[in-house]
Image (tube, rainbow, N blue to C red):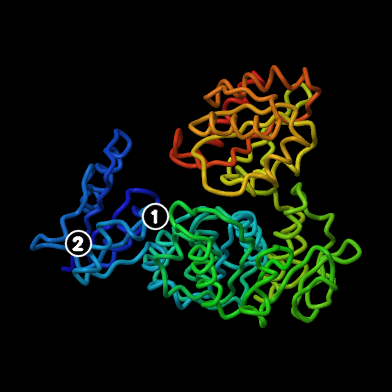
Amino acid sequence: MSNACVIGLGKSGVAAARLLKREGWQVILSDRSDSASLRQQQQQLAAEGITVCLGHTPNLDSTDSPQLIVVSPGVPWDADILNRARELAIETIGEMELAWRYLNAVPWVGITGTNGKTTTTALVAAIFQTAGLNAPACGNIGYAVCDVALEFRNQGAGSRGAEEQRGKGSNSSHQPLATSHSLDWIIAEISSYQIESAPSVAPRIGVWTTFTPDHLSRHKTLERYYDIKAHLVHQSQLQVINGDDAFLSQEKLNNWQDAYWTSVKGKAFLNCHPDLGTYIEDGWVISGQEQIVQVSALRMVGAHNLQNLLMAVAVARLAGIDKEAIATAIATFPGVPHRLEHICTWQGIDFINDSKATNYDAAQVGLSSVTSPAILIAGGEAKIGDDLAWLQTIQAQAAAVLLIGDAAPAFALRLSQVGYNNYEIVETMARAVARAAELAPQYQARVVLLSPACASFDRYQNFEQRGDDFRQLCLELLK
């Protein structure tokens, strides 16, 4: 029996370990951390025959070193342990690459970008599922792709392709992984961390939503970050690209002459022939010069969501989905949790969860999308990036800013430097929500917005946990 080591006891790592175990590997799952919750997982996985080593880094120089190493996305691709594995010629891949090896007979939609990819992924999955296709949303959203592969292998499923439809399906991106012995499409949100460790993944349709500086503490340079994203899209048979993105539109002549481009500004702004474009004209989404759905059918707020809508429609039309299914899915799509998610209305004030806004650009879009003046809650684990547009939007839109987490002192300094002084360092989410409830009536603010512009790892396991904390605190106000 061959030995495999999975590094990282997150959702992706656990899914990879279970898939490898099912395929006959002897699996050790290793994580440098140790906690009560991890020890509980350790016991559960031990019952499944998977050894979990906590507070542990694998020894690759031992006599029983693994033949395969699979890493979770959170493990840096240039970590010392992985560099040593390459020196020893131990095959080292990411969880996404492992899943691809079992799912490459199924057509994929691979969606990447700095911002907008989660909403676009969820909307694409909703459209495909409304059309009757078994097309789970997975990857950086919902399920790990190895979970889908495991279910697929357990079912003994074979793909029939997107041209076959079964009748009415769920429009939820969190439907059960396999409702029959068929898997029609994989709808995968793929982050730069996942692309980096999955060089073979080649989607049928690749989507690039936006490109702005992010994750530079890991990728080091903007050029490296761009090259990682571009690799996935180049690998794709068909490419859908946001033509309104300032950076991506400049790249058209060099790299993307055959792509399908989108533009909310109309046909004249496309970077391709109108037959290959998806755009807005007279209140309609037009794709291939055919009216598909009225823009007013979309329930999500924010101008940025119009671009997400266009990319989802472009993908659906390339997959052969009829416009009736597209229109139905869009009209009933509620949006995604943690991205401008309306939590409650308390004393006439809307509390909105935008915890998914983990960088300056996403937070700037979030604040621009809500009614002003707003009370903004921001902070967490700061990222490298250009904060100027975000700060300008705060000056124009925010009645007050409540700062939480490790970034609070640095954010306070930046706000002072641009002449904005109506901020408070409150440190915790609980204090932020309570203080926002006090301030909003004073400033006649109709919105309290959590849009952190930061990663969550200073206080939370992920942005979802941060958003859930905000939600719970807001709902307690109603009591």
> 27 and 30: which one is in front?
30
> 467 and 178: which one is in front?
467
- Quadrant of the rendering where the N terminus is positioned: bottom left
Q: What residue sits right under mark 1 in the picture?
A: 12
User: Crowding near pointer 1: few (<14 within 10 Å), some, many (20+)?
Assistant: many
- Which amino acid type is marked by label 2? Gln
Q: What residue sits right under mark 2 in the picture?
A: 26
Q: Is residue 472 left or right of residue 228?
A: right
- Quadrant of the rendering where the C terminus is positioned: top right
x%, y% of residue 178? 48, 62
x%, y% of residue 329? 72, 59
> 110 and 1: which one is in front?
110
Q: Give the spatial CA distance, label 1 vs label 2.
A: 18 Å
Q: Is residue 177 above or below residue 160?
A: above
Identify the image quadrant of residue 7. Answer: bottom left
Residue drawn at x 62%, y 75% as measured from the top left:
239
Q: Secondary structure at mark 1?
A: helix
x%, y% of residue 59? 15, 55
Residue farthest along the right direction in this orientation: 282
x%, y% of residue 204? 56, 77
> Does residue 344 appear in the picture of this structure?
no
Residue farthest along the left direction in this orientation: 63
Q: Is residue 45 above or below residue 442?
A: below
User: Crowding near pointer 2: few (<14 within 10 Å), some, many (20+)?
Assistant: some
First in residue order: circle 1 vs circle 2: 1
Identify the image quadrant of residue 152. Answer: bottom left
Q: Is residue 418 left or right of residue 53?
A: right
- Which amino acid type is marked by label 1? Ser
Q: Secondary structure at mark 2?
A: strand
> Does residue 174 appear in the picture of this structure?
yes
Residue drawn at x 54%, y 77% as measured from the top left:
234
